[in-house]
Amino acid sequence: MGQRDIRRLPIIGAMSAIHWKGRDGGRAGSWLARMLSHKPRMLVAIALANKFARIIWAIIMRREDYRDPAGVVC
């Protein structure tokens, strides 16, 4: 797996999350819904992938398990 693939995988995952949230409309007023209403999908996917990366980095650095913030993520 090359460097290009490693960079692309989080964006593919974010596009998948956007696709699935788009099917049911997502929660009105959520971060994702607000972003999608103002910005192009690919830009939102990159922002979401960056958000995922920051969450993962914080989990690794703190050596903690992931705690779902009760619907705050998207």
Image: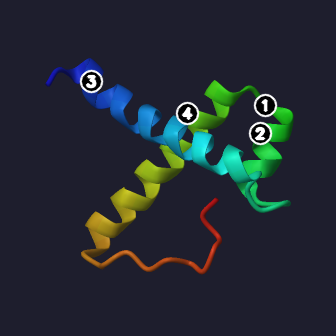
Of tags 2 and 4, which is closer to the observer?
Answer: 2
Q: Which mark is residue 36?
A: 2
* Type of amino acid at the residue the image marks with label 3: Asp
Please report whichever mark, 2 or 4, sits nearer to the chain's N-terminal start. 2
Please report whichever mark, 3 or 2, sits nearer to the chain's N-terminal start. 3
**Quick one: 45 or 62, which is closer to the camera?**
45
Q: Which residue is mark 3?
A: 5
Gap between marks 3 and 2 measured at Cα:
25 Å
Helix or strand or loop: what does disc 1 sit on?
Answer: loop
Would you say the residues marked 2 and 1 are in contact, meaning their CB atoms lie under 8 Å apart? yes
Q: Which residue is mark 1?
A: 39
Helix or strand or loop: what does disc 4 sit on?
Answer: helix
In this picture, is 55 found above or below 42? Answer: below
Gap between marks 2 and 1 measured at Cα:
5 Å
Residue 49 image position (x, y, % from top left): 49, 42
Gap between marks 2 and 4 measured at Cα:
12 Å
Sort mark 1 into few (<14), some (14-19) or many (20+) by Cα contacts within 10 Å: few
Please report whichever mark, 1 or 4, sits nearer to the chain's N-terminal start. 1
Please report whichever mark, 1 or 3, sits nearer to the chain's N-terminal start. 3
Sort mark 2 into few (<14), some (14-19) or many (20+) by Cα contacts within 10 Å: some
Sort mark 3 into few (<14), some (14-19) or many (20+) by Cα contacts within 10 Å: few
At horizontal 31% and vertical 78% (from top left) the residue drawn is 65
Q: Is residue 59 left or right of residue 54?
A: left
Please report whichever mark, 4 or 3, sits nearer to the chain's N-terminal start. 3
Q: Is residue 51 left or right of residue 66?
A: right
Q: Quadrant of the C terminus?
A: bottom right
* Type of amino acid at the residue the image marks with label 2: Leu
Q: Which residue is mark 4?
A: 46
Q: Is residue 11 left or right of residue 7?
A: right
Gap between marks 1 and 3 measured at Cα:
25 Å
